């Protein structure tokens, strides 16, 4: 099992490039189910979840070519024949995004059988909102032996109000609605850039969608979609992680190939924390003198749906808060079990207490190297950030979580001065 070995103390200097967004790429790959024609996706990140999605689509009968290197992260998908519309448990057990094939499968084939989703153990991500929406559109859904089965002759347009904001629920039902008979009106939709990215692809495929990126989306169903070519958004969470890496190490780091307009809430909190930012069109320069200077100041954050502070940046910001002067409070409002990194950060010398959904971080504490365990994707990132400033050499176990969502993060960080290496088999190399 792979491990990271990280020796702290080096400021990050230079330019680091952001990959395509995993959370945009996964629904866009699922959208290819909706047409017999070829869909070409560019800027696809080379991460484990993408490989899992490839296996999933191929198991259904799709032809998928993942291209890296010379192909510039370009993926070709053609679902001319879907011979087995089943998302098998043995394939999707490590990936929460498996539910994203439910909507497009039933819209295209009239039948879908999908294993209940797996992925990080960070709390419940109920699929009931997907089910409720599809039932409103005329699908009959049963559940047995860990699988959901949905059937319909053809989905019908409906008025769907989400009981709570859900990104995957919005995406899944949006894909179902584009081939439904008539108009579908969605209210209380997720507004994340990943939803907008998916809608852009669907529109390029011939869908009629209005309001993506707002809380109300209106879809006029069409009889058929065609192929399209689409470039995936840059990964705002990877960009945010690198910004914090520059800030926590006292570095001067240019985070390139990102979209600053997707990072507003994080940039605001970093500036409140005392980090200097120079924001360009597609790059952000972060300059920091690190904890020793007293420049970093404690701030409070509360995770919210977009455009609020993202839950996927909570763990990374907590690592930064350990080096800020004063006490920060961090409230997690999205997932109920997303403080599993706290124990590991405390093992490295942090002073963090948790009460309910709120963590209090008493900052400017010197961190020490330790052997720590990665519990989920973003917790892994927080431990890498802490290790970059810890005294001595830390060993991070179970970094396969990191490989689910960050493309060769150790190589990217090493390129800007981090002392980090991987022990074990390197993901993506034969």
Image (cartoon, grey):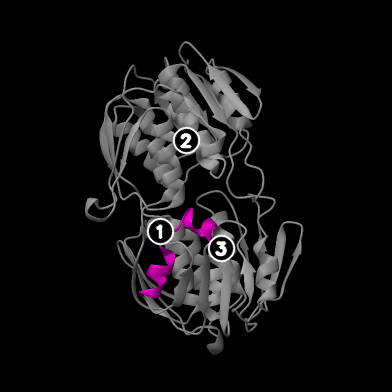
First reached walking from the N terminus: tag 1 or tag 3: 3
**Could you tell me how far apart the alpha carbons at marks 1 and 2 are, in whole angstroms?**
24 Å
- Tell which of 179 and 426 is nearer to you: 426
Which numbered disc, 3 or 2, marks the residue closer to the eye? 3
Q: Are marks 3 and 2 in contact (CB under 8 Å)?
A: no
| Element assignment for label 3 | helix
Hey, which residue is sitting farthest bottom in the picture?
A: 293
- Tell which of 60 and 169 is nearer to you: 60
Instruction: Describe residue 151's horizontal placement relative to residue 200 as left or right.
Output: right
| Element assignment for label 1 | loop
Q: Which residue, given by chain and number where applicable, does mark 3 sit on?
A: 380
Region of the chain picked out in magenta, as a range: 398-415
Hey, which residue is sitting farthest right in the picture?
A: 355
Hey, which residue is sitting farthest left in the picture?
A: 70
Q: Residue at x 62, y 41 (%)?
A: 125
Q: Position of residue 292 (x, y in %)?
A: 55, 88
Q: Which residue, given by chain and number where applicable, does mark 2 sit on?
A: 171
First reached walking from the N terminus: tag 1 or tag 2: 2
- Within the magenta stretch, is there residue 373? no
What crowding class fits label 2: few (fewer than 14 Cα within 10 Å), some (14-19), or many (20 or more)? many
| Element assignment for label 2 | helix
Instruction: Describe residue 256's horizontal placement relative to residue 349 as left or right.
Output: left
Quadrant assignment, res 368: bottom right
Q: Residue at x 63, y 30 (%)?
A: 128
**Height in image: 74 above or below 411?**
above
Hey, which residue is sitting farthest top in the picture?
A: 153
Instruction: Describe residue 28's horizontal placement relative to residue 307 as left or right.
Output: left
What crowding class fits label 3: few (fewer than 14 Cα within 10 Å), some (14-19), or many (20 or more)? many
Q: Which residue, given by chain and number where applicable, does mark 1 sit on?
A: 407
């Amino acid at each position: 099992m792979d491990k990271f070995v990280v020796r702290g103390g080096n400021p990050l200097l230079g330019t680091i490039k952001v990959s395509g967004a995993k959370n945009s790429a996964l629904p866009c790959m699922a959208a290819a189910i909706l047409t017999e024609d070829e869909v070409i996706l560019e800027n696809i990140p080379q991460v484990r979840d993408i490989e899992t999605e490839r296996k999933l689509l191929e198991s259904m009968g799709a032809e998928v070519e993942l291209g890296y290197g010379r192909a510039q992260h370009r993926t070709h998908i053609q679902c001319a024949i879907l011979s087995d519309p089943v998302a098998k448990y043995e394939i999707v057990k490590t990936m929460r995004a498996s539910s994203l094939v439910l909507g497009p499968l039933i819209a295209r084939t009239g039948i879908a059988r999908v294993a209940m989703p797996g992925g990080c153990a960070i709390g419940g991500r109920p699929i009931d909102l997907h089910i409720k929406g599809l039932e409103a559109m005329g699908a009959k859904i049963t559940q047995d032996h860990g699988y959901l089965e949905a059937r319909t002759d053809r989905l019908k347009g409906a008025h769907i109000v989400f009981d709570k904001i859900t990104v995957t629920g919005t995406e899944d039902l949006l894909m179902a609605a584009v081939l439904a008979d008539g108009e579908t009106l969605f209210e209380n939709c997720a507004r994340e850039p990943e939803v907008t990215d998916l809608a852009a692809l669907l529109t390029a495929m011939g869908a009629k969608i209005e309001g993506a990126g707002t809380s109300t989306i209106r879809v006029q169903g069409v009889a058929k979609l065609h192929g399209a070519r689409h470039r995936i958004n840059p990964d705002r969470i990877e960009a945010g992680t690198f910004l914090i890496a520059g800030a926590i190490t006292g570095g001067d780091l240019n985070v390139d190939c990102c979209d600053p307009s997707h990072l507003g809430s994080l940039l605001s909190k970093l500036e409140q924390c005392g980090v200097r930012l120079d924001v360009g069109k597609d790059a952000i320069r972060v300059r920091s003198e690190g904890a020793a200077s007293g420049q970093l100041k404690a701030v409070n954050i509360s995770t919210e749906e977009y455009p609020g502070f993202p839950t996927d940046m909570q763990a990374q910001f907590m690592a930064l808060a350990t080096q800020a002067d004063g006490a920060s409070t961090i409230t997690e409002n999205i997932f109920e079990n997303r403080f599993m990194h706290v124990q590991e950060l405390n093992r490295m010398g942090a002073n963090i207490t948790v009460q309910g959904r709120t963590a209090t971080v008493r900052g400017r504490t010197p961190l020490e190297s330790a052997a720590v365990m990665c519990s989920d994707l973003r917790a892994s990132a927080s431990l890498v950030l802490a290790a970059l400033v810890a005294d001595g050499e830390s060993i991070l176990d179970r970094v396969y979580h990191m490989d689910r969502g960050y493309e060769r993060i150790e190589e990217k960080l090493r390129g800007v001065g981090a002392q980090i290496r991987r022990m074990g088999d390197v993901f993506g190399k034969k």
